Amino acid sequence: MAVRTPICLTIAGSDSGGGAGIQADLKAFAAQGVHGTCAIAGLTAQNTVGVTRIDPVAPRMIVEQVHAVLTDIGTDAVKIGMVGSEPSIRAVVEALAALPAGVPVVIDPVMVAESGARLLEADAQRAFVRDLLPLATVVTPNLPEALVLAGRDDVTDLDALTDDDVLAVARTIQAAGPANVLVTGGHRAAAEDLLLLQDGTALRLPGERHADGAAHGSGCTHSSTLAARLAVGDDLPRAARVARAEAGESVRRGLRDVGAGPGPVDVLDLQALRARAAERADALVAAPDRIATP
């Protein structure tokens, strides 16, 4: 009997450079053997150097995209990325009301692009914390985003923070409503993720730092891999460990020759895919052509 295909829905912004956002999410889902669906919440004119324009999608269109997916295809997990504005946040909250009970929701609080551009409007941050964050099965901020969510954005020296400091930040975020908090560690020398579970247990997930890699889209890839692993049935600690490892490997393989800025991560291992595609192409054209006769 055929195994049912797992489904993961991303609600996020589009990256015209193909490195982050919806594009990164769908690649990360595919890398885990999961079919990806999407609801685009915003459009960005973006490349590896910067973001030149952000246009929100009409709130009703966000809701209708989610409705179209859920009423026909369904989903086993949801990942939420860039939502950008307060009307968009309200639309996402409305759309999530149609989710079946028990479907995990991974929220990546996308606030700042790798290039430094702000992706979450300042006036939307309050609505994000008040209305969206409590719906999260797990929220996955990087350390700068975690400090903002915890009201500690005055901290500038991230490496001066102790492990206990990071745990305190995670607990402050958890108090705002998300069941679990995963603070990603790519901005500290230790490169260690911290997972704070609903029962108060804290797990430290070590990983390698790849300083010579390419990291554009690493946060999206991390949270989307996490959502995909939840969609296939992993528990949260296992999903978080896989996400940490896959994100690190994606940075290590990152496409440093793409664009003038921080290149995109490579979650699919394009070099290996090209080699396999070439082998398939050779096999497909191995048979001699037949000459058509009248």
Image: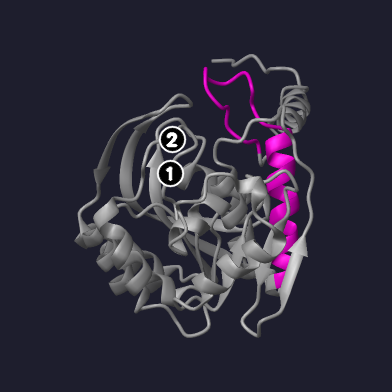
Q: Position of residue 15 (x, y in %)?
A: 42, 38
For the point 45% across and 82% down, which residue is it? 100
Is residue 253 found left or right of 175 in the rendered image?
A: right
For the point 46% across and 32% down, which residue is it? 115
CB contact under 8 Å: marks 2 and 1: yes
For the point 54% across and 79% down, which residue is it? 179
Q: Nearer the viewer, residue 40 or 141?
A: 141
Residue 4 lies in what quarter of the image? bottom right
Q: Name the image colouring.
A: one colour
Name the residue tied to disc 1.
112
Is residue 271 found left or right of 42 in the rendered image?
A: right
Secondary structure of the residue carrying numbered label 2: loop
Residue 232 seen anywhere in this rendered image of the structure? no
Name the residue tied to disc 2.
116
Secondary structure of the residue carrying numbered label 1: loop
Q: Position of residue 120 (x, y in %)?
A: 34, 50
Magenta segment boundaries in residue numbering = 237-266
Residue 140 seen anywhere in this rendered image of the structure? yes
Q: Position of residue 91 (x, y in %)?
A: 26, 66
